[in-house]
Amino acid sequence: MKKLINDADDYVDEMLDGMVAAHPDAVRRLPETKVLVRSDAPVEGTVGVVSGGGSGHEPTHAGYLGEGMLDGAAAGEVFTSPTGDELAEMVRACDGGEGVLCVVKNYEGDVMNFDTAAEMAEIQGDVAVEQVVVNDDVAVEDSTYTSGRRGVCGTILVHKCAGAKAAEGADLDEVKRVAEKTIENVATMGTALTSCVTPAKGEPTFDLGEDELELGIGIHGEPGVERTGMLSADEVADRLTAAVLDDLEPSGEVATVVNGMGGTPLSELYIVQRRLSELLDEEGLDVAEAMVGDYMTSLDMRGCSITVLDLDDELRELLGRPAHTPALTV
Amino acid sequence: MKKLINDADDYVDEMLDGMVAAHPDAVRRLPETKVLVRSDAPVEGTVGVVSGGGSGHEPTHAGYLGEGMLDGAAAGEVFTSPTGDELAEMVRACDGGEGVLCVVKNYEGDVMNFDTAAEMAEIQGDVAVEQVVVNDDVAVEDSTYTSGRRGVCGTILVHKCAGAKAAEGADLDEVKRVAEKTIENVATMGTALTSCVTPAKGEPTFDLGEDELELGIGIHGEPGVERTGMLSADEVADRLTAAVLDDLEPSGEVATVVNGMGGTPLSELYIVQRRLSELLDEEGLDVAEAMVGDYMTSLDMRGCSITVLDLDDELRELLGRPAHTPALTV
């Protein structure tokens, strides 16, 4: 294992400290927790939009803290859910009087702990809490860590649309409605060229031969649904795009994300984007927004995912609204 | 070699097509060239700021095309300078009547071809052309590819400050003065945990043992100046920061970049940032802006560089001005 780390036990703590050190005007850390919030949280008169989950997916979630996206982001240890206590503390810290929407990726630990947190915040803090669960990964119906589909890179677009709705002063029901609409219309599938290596274990989560790749991977180093010989970038784009479009059946206008898994050079993501653009063009789809980069990663894994969001007028407009966060500025 | 590519011969072409496909409103490609320019180039009444060099450093340079940074970006093949012809075509395409500033990283091929391009554009196109050469790498005085120090990640800050000055309508001499001031005040040093692998060769540019790292690497897979056993993130930050501060001797306020080399997870860069912030604090330096991410890469290399820019009022203000580019929005 070759990593730029100190003690593996301090990995998450030091990373969070580094984020605060880099962006002290944008984010702050709740004392004695792994929760980062917008420096100006709670924002009075707006719904708080929060998320969280295991670490290892950076810039997810704390990179999206800021005006127009998230108010709070809770980190667990690598690939481990944050505790209910810390999630509840985040919810209370992000309530500006209008309640809080929790955006949860569909993993059993996350869903359970966010449920606990919502109960605690409602009882102890008198906070109105709603929850949405993102399940955009079309690769598998049930998986190692989930009942139903996994929540992956599409989560970023839920942050963006719900955050934009909250920023305009909409009430909790409306922000939740937008989040659910985004979830209903987003689909993702990913591929890995290599496994990721966790700091604690120091070895690959799964083995993949020099001439193999894995289709349908999740974001925790869990293996995919099909192992094949190496494919070209175009073949990968063809396979991922077909799976996503089959599920979504979009028409008209879409937004897309070609997402790197953490160890993939940007140049390769643009090569995938080139083919994705061709495929969408062949399908007669217009692309309102194409994001290319590392948005939802799996430590140092090499590979990518393709996300498509089927847009209507409302989602397109919300996606285009200003956002100011460390990882995404619109 | 495991890469998301098609034919290695098409690597640069397809990447550039992907950039245009992703950002059609922001950039366009000059026909029959590997030059991308702002979609609205030339911008009448402002100095054109252009750059270029071998590919493999993405998002450098085309990711920085847009209002407030670059007007043109020429790509060569991987780690190979663009031709004089293509550079001259870029210069002509980016002249809005006020002349063009070429920001050149100090590599012999780049400097020579930009010289040729300037002559061609001046003679054939009646364009006023000035050139600045960035040489921010403090690791080596002369190297495989350079007389004098190499130009590396500090180049991004030259793009930003010179681009901001050009956007306000300053004349060519003034834009050049700002670029030179930025160059005078910026220093960088990098480290590699792994070599990069070029698409054409498909194997590492240099060998590095499982328990070794290389200090003082450049951005072309050229080896560094010192090979050591593995160091912790803090030890790496200590070494790189000391070298940069020794060279620069800044006082007061600085901007910093913790730059990933292409294959490094963002989480690790934040762990380095944490230590960098401590060190700068110990030195009594204030940080006006801390950038953390992949800005000037070396294909899939794992590692990072640390850049410090010693600020005065003018540079701080220019750095903070708005910019709208695919890779950086302020």
Image: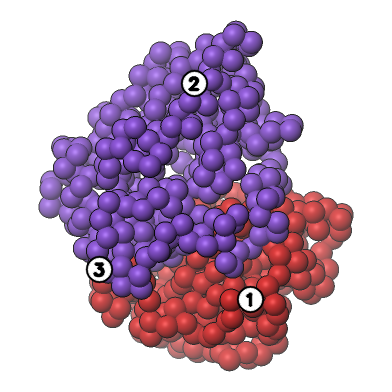
Chain colours: A purple, B red
Which residue lies at the image location 40% right of the left edge and 24% below the top edge?
Answer: A132
Judged from the image, the secondary structure of the residue bearing numbered disc 1 is loop
User: Percent x, y for residue A294?
Assistant: 45, 53
Q: What residue type is labelled 1?
A: Asp
Would you name the residue on which mark 1 appears? B211
Which residue lies at the image location 25% right of the left edge and 56% below the top edge?
Answer: A226
Would you name the residue on which mark 3 appears? A229
Q: Label 1, label 3: how many angstroms apart (C-alpha)?
A: 30 Å
Would you name the residue on which mark 2 appears? A115
Judged from the image, the secondary structure of the residue bearing numbered disc 3 is strand
Which chain is indicated by disc 1?
A: B
Judged from the image, the secondary structure of the residue bearing numbered disc 2 is helix
Q: Earlier in the sequence, mark 3 or mark 2?
A: 2
Q: Which amino acid does label 3 sit on?
A: Gly
* Res. B243 image quadrant: bottom right
Which residue lies at the image location 54% right of the left edge and 55% below the top edge?
Answer: A198
